[in-house]
Each structure stands twice: as C-alpha cells, then as structure tokens.
Amino acid sequence: MKLLTVALSIAVGAVAPAFAIGMIGSKAVEALGRNPEAESAIRTTMILALAFAEAIAIYALVVALILKFA
Amino acid sequence: MPKISIKAEIITHLFGLAITNSMIASAIVFLLTVFVALYFKHQSTQKRKGNFYYLIKFFIKSIYDLFYSVLGAKTDVFFPLLFSFFFYILLENWFGLLPGVGSILIKVVEGHEEVFVPLLRGNNADLNTTLALAIISVLSIQFFAIKYLGVKKYLHKFFNFSDPISFFVGILDILSEFSKVLSFAFRLFGNIFAGEVLLTIVAFLVPVLASFPFIALEIFVGFVQALVFSMLTAVFLSGAIAEHH
C-alpha cells in the first residue's frame, strides 16, 4: 500500500508541471518567431518561468522520496 | 538494494558536535573555492598572467552579462553575492559526481552495531545546506531592500493600512517571503538528492557503462540549478529595490 502511494504521488504530481513546461516552451518559441530581436530577454524569462514550473514537480518528488525512505 | 538515507550520516563527534559526511565534503569544496579566489586575486596583480586566469575571467564575464540584462546598472553592487552563490553551488553540485564520493565506505559505530556509511556525500543533497543558502539569500534581499528604500517605505510595503485590500495584499507578501525560503531550499535539495538516488539505483541495476548518460544529465542539472538559484535571487532583488508604484 505504501509503495502504491509513493508511485502515485510522483506520477500524478508530474502531470501538471510537464504540461506547464510544454506550454511555456511553445509560447516562448512563438514570441521568438514574432520578434527575433528580443532573443536574450525571451530566453532569460523562459528559463525563469521554467524553474518555477519545474519546482512543483520537484516538490512532488521530495514527498515521494520522504515517504519511501523515512 | 543499496541503502539510501535522506539524513546525512554521522561519522564522528568533535568537541560534542556531530560531524556528518556532507560536512567533510563541504569543507573540501569551501577550501577549493577559497583557493581559486585567492589564486585569481594574486594573478590579477602580476605582469604576465597565467592561462587559468583568463579562463576564469571569461567565465565571470559571461555570467556578468547574464546578470546585466536583469539588474541593469546596479549589477556592480550585487555581483559579488550572486557570483559567490553561483560558483559555490556549482562546485557543490559537481562534487557529488566525482568517483569516490558516496562509494568509499567507512566503519562507524551507530547505536549498538557497526555499519558501513559513505565517507563523503555531496553537500547539496543535505537539506540543512540548502535551507541555510535559502535563508541567506532571502535575508540579504530584505537587507538590500531596507538599504535602498529606507525602513519606512520597506515596512509600508507589507503593512499598508489605507484600504482593506492593500492590507490583505501586504499580509500575502509576508507569506510569500517565507514561501520563497521553502521553494529555494526544496528546489535545490530535490534536484540534487533525486540525482544521487538515480545514480545509485542505475549503478546498482546495470553495473557496466549504463551510468554514463545519467552522469552527463547530472552535470547539466547541476549547472542549471546553480544558474536558476542565482538568477532567481537577482530577479527578487530587482523587484525588492524597485519603488512600489
């Protein structure tokens, strides 16, 4: 039962961040296509937003690790 | 099944203070950082500079250009803090990938039995370190905000009694400062600890050659996490010292 909880927590917790990262990437590439001169600003903002979105998946992973190993 | 523990294992006791294996690794990385910094300073006053000096200088210039796009003209004031974060976290992340870290075991008396624990462990895989770094980062953001805005304007950002909505938003701002500490700590800890668990399990399952792409991934993740930590500190700094409206 505990193993099932561990597996489910990381599996479900990684769905929304994956979707969010895909959307961030697609919007960034679209903005780059419309205005190729602002490449540096777009890249910096995209990496920042990517870090915030990925942190949610890392929270789910930390919960799963704590459940399994402690 | 290899033994994985979230807490860093205690190696010995020194004057009543418990020394863990991640503390030993952090002492080594700290000495390495100080050595590189002193070498750079000493070489900058010589007439004929070594090749390593130019390599470090190119590295620092690229990171400076990256921060210049976020902070603008005030980069000179904050750059020592930001680059120290970046360099220290980068070296700590990469230290956990060296051969020998996590695999050389030492016999330790734990309770009533003798167990084998790793002698060295990457320091960012310990929640104490990342929590300390997060607290330092958020406290220095508050310090610079008070220094640039003055105490009255800084308090006015959080305790705003003009109308109920601004009061509520001020309370939410206080909460968001605490959530920044937690988010910094858990982002760094989660990435590096999950990388260590992944490497251990992969080396356990397929002992020959399969670890190579995962170690390459961990090198990349270590670099990105150091960059993200310092970039987020820079962005929060530029938001905190800006005027309210």
Image (cartoon, rainbow, N blue to C red):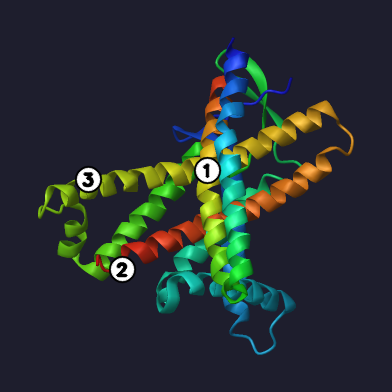
Q: Are marks 1 and 2 in contact (CB under 8 Å)?
A: no
**Of the residues shown, which amino acid type is indicated by label 1?**
Ala
For residue B171, which numbered disc appears in the image?
3
Residue at image position (47%, 39%) is B128
Q: How far apart are the two marked residues, 3 and 1, measured between alpha carbons?
A: 24 Å
What is the residue that sits farthest to the bottom in this orientation? B47
Above or below residue B13? Residue B56 is below
Q: Are marks 3 and 2 in contact (CB under 8 Å)?
A: no
Front residue of A5 and B210:
A5
Residue B176 horizontal/vertical position (percent): 33, 46
How many other residues sit within 10 Å of disc 1, few (<14), some (14-19) or many (≥20)?
some
Residue at image position (62%, 55%) is A26
Q: Dot 2 lies on which element?
A: loop
Q: How far apart are the two marked residues, 3 and 2, measured between alpha carbons?
A: 19 Å
How many other residues sit within 10 Å of disc 3, few (<14), some (14-19) or many (≥20)?
some
Above or below residue B196? Residue B133 is below
Residue that mark 2 sits on = B242
For residue A55, which numbered disc appears in the image?
1
How many other residues sit within 10 Å of disc 2, few (<14), some (14-19) or many (≥20)?
few
